[in-house]
Amino acid sequence: MPLEFTDPQSLSHDALEEGDVFAPRFDDKGLITAIAVEASSGTVLMLAHMNAEALRLTLETREVHYFSRSRAHLWKKGETSGEVQKLLGIRVDCDQDALLVLVEQTGRGAACHTGRKTCFYRVVTTENGEPRLTSTGEPRLFDPEVVYNR
Amino acid sequence: MPLEFTDPQSLSHDALEEGDVFAPRFDDKGLITAIAVEASSGTVLMLAHMNAEALRLTLETREVHYFSRSRAHLWKKGETSGEVQKLLGIRVDCDQDALLVLVEQTGRGAACHTGRKTCFYRVVTTENGEPRLTSTGEPRLFDPEVVYNR
């Protein structure tokens, strides 16, 4: 039987925030925000979204699935690149509209489609009142032109 | 002169993802997602949103500001609770629609309005195909009924 999620509207505020009923609050587009973190290091790898089906598949297969907003479809992380994320755990936040997804990043260890471990490879700096980006020096672990056949 | 942000539409795909121009991609509601992380420990504290004004104030004052979607207004984190977040750094992701905000969580060290350090204090478990939540045992560092005068 496929996993069913409780409707958050059926819960009191207290039950939503302090209870043991999992009632993910999908937004008006049917999506919930997911932060993927490498469990072993705590590094924030990426931010993405899941619809109910992606969340269900993630919990059932223990491999992380997302819903791409730009391509408007469900995808298994790593289905093209091989960079599959093994699910080690999921936490939900106080009002149940965000998930923290603890993963083992397999493959070459690159969560980002640019070939880097993490999507957060640039720092915002403000010199003379003008914001700029500076690279953290995060190396590419694969060449996206090869992996995605561009 | 207040900080100005570049319009991401003015950049090429390559410049957006690999360049040094900060062009935050606010969504159709004018918001960008922000993950607050405790810089010293790497703990993910909370997920919230910023509009351009909140981001500007955060960069200018070095204290973190957010935009509340439920209350539809700008707020300085800690303005009621005292749990101010000092900004230590901001990173942006590959396509510039998410921010990683590195903070020192001041006050009692509780980022969550429930009084806990982190909003992610419950784990999703699936026994017998039914998802449930289990507490991580994260302690309350303040009593929300006292702090928020409920």
Image (spheres, coloured by chain):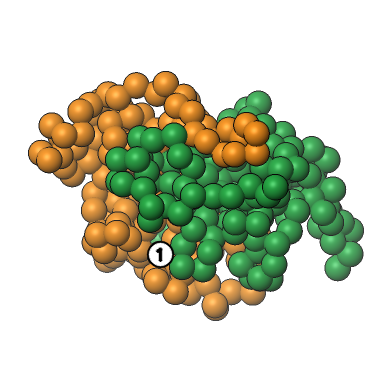
Chain colours: A orange, B green
Residue with the most extreme front position = B1
Asked if residue B99 can be seen in this view, the reply is yes
Q: Which sits in the foreground, B51 or B22?
A: B22
Q: Position of residue B14 (x, y in %)?
A: 30, 40
Image quarter in which the C terminus of chain A is found: top left
Q: Is residue B43 left or right of residue A23?
A: right
Q: Position of residue A47 (x, y in %)?
A: 43, 47
Residue B136 sits in quarter? top right
Tally the numbered discs.
1
Q: Residue at x 35, y 65 (%)?
A: A52
* Rendering coords of residue B126 (x, y %): 41, 53
Q: Residue furthest left?
A: A149
The N terminus of chain A: image quadrant: bottom left
Give above or below for A53 relative to A62. Answer: below
Q: Residue B97 in the image: x percent, y percent?
A: 44, 51
Question: In this orientation, which residue lies closer to the viewer: B121 or B89?
Answer: B89
Dot 1: element: loop
- In the visual, does B74 lie left or right of A8? right
Q: Quadrant of residue A116?
A: top left
Whether residue B2 sits left or right of residue A27 in the image: it is right
Tag 1: amino acid: Leu
| Residue that carries the numbered disc 1 in the rendered image | A31
Confirm whether residue B135 shows in the render. Answer: no
* Residue drawn at the location 68% of the way across and 49% of the way down: B2
Q: Residue at x 45, y 27 (%)?
A: A135
Q: Which residue is drawn at the image coordinates 18% and 44% (left, top)?
A: A79
Establish if B124 lies above or below B36: below
Residue A114: image quadrant is top left
Q: Chain of mark 1?
A: A
The local crowd at label 1, few if under 14, some if 14 to 19, many if 20 or more residues have their Cα within 10 Å, is: many
